[in-house]
Image: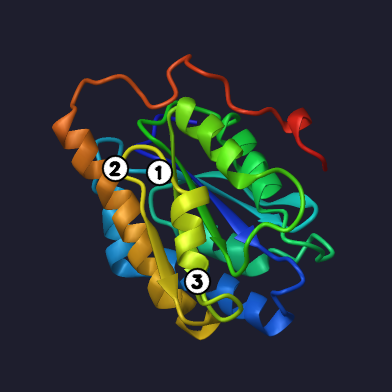
Amino acid sequence: MNPVDLALCLAIDVSDSVDFDEFALMIGGLAAAFRAPDVQAAIAGGRAGAIAASAIFWAEAQEVAVPWMRLGDANAFADALDAAPRIPRGGATALGDGMVAGLAMLGRVPGRAERLVLDVSGDGRANRGRAPGAVRDIGVAAGVTINALAVLNEEPDLLAHYQSEVIGGPGNFALSCADYADFADAIRLKLLREIRGALVADRANAGASTANRQGVPLPSAASHPA
């Protein structure tokens, strides 16, 4: 893969609290966001003129929904999201394990990326598996920025949990939306902020080294349960 301005892994909650109608709204919203003209303009606006993106679904198990793709325009990635089946069989909200799977994906980016970002979205606190705060610290030490989108339909105070236990790294942030019906607008704004944030950093630090530059290793695929 040729160099990219940003490697972005979407880590998407598909635990038991997400029913199939909500899943359809979430994945449809993500696909629509990547097709949005302002998101596509942001993707094309960096020095490399492209980003890399992938997606995982997580609950008690974690599976790759869309493997790494280089996005000049993002229509093929949006199509792949639309076509992705709900792979895990639901279960508890193993948020920390989902984050480990996302970091492992970022450790396998097939090329050079100026920044590494893990984009976590979900509607509940961790209730199984690794503590997300400890996983966040591993990612931050490896040079990853972790951002989050909290869907508040199940837990109205989830944003505070994401702010304290999930997000970290340079320029990190968390957003919220009231329900999955609002997901499309919220994720589009989130993607714009992530991608444009990469462009701002790129322009301010032209010639600087890339994000995870032979520093602390990211988790491998073998370091989390399938």
Q: Position of residue 49 (x, y in %)?
A: 30, 42
Q: Badge 3 is on which residue?
A: 157
Q: Position of residue 178 (x, y in %)?
A: 47, 81
Q: Are marks 2 and 1 in contact (CB under 8 Å)?
A: yes
Q: Amino acid at mark 1?
A: Ile
Residue drawn at the location 43% of the way across and 28% of the way down: 143
N-terminal of the two: label 2 or label 1?
1
Q: Amino acid at mark 2?
A: Ala
Residue 157 drawn above or below residue 87: below
In depth, the one of 220 and 96 nearer the eye is 96
CA gap between label 2 and label 1 equals: 10 Å
In depth, the one of 224 and 221 nearer the eye is 224
Q: Badge 1 is on which residue?
A: 51
Few, some or many residues within 10 Å of mark 1 (<14, 14–19, 20+)? many
Quadrant assignment for the C terminus: top right
CA gap between label 2 and label 3 equals: 29 Å
Q: Badge 2 is on which residue?
A: 198
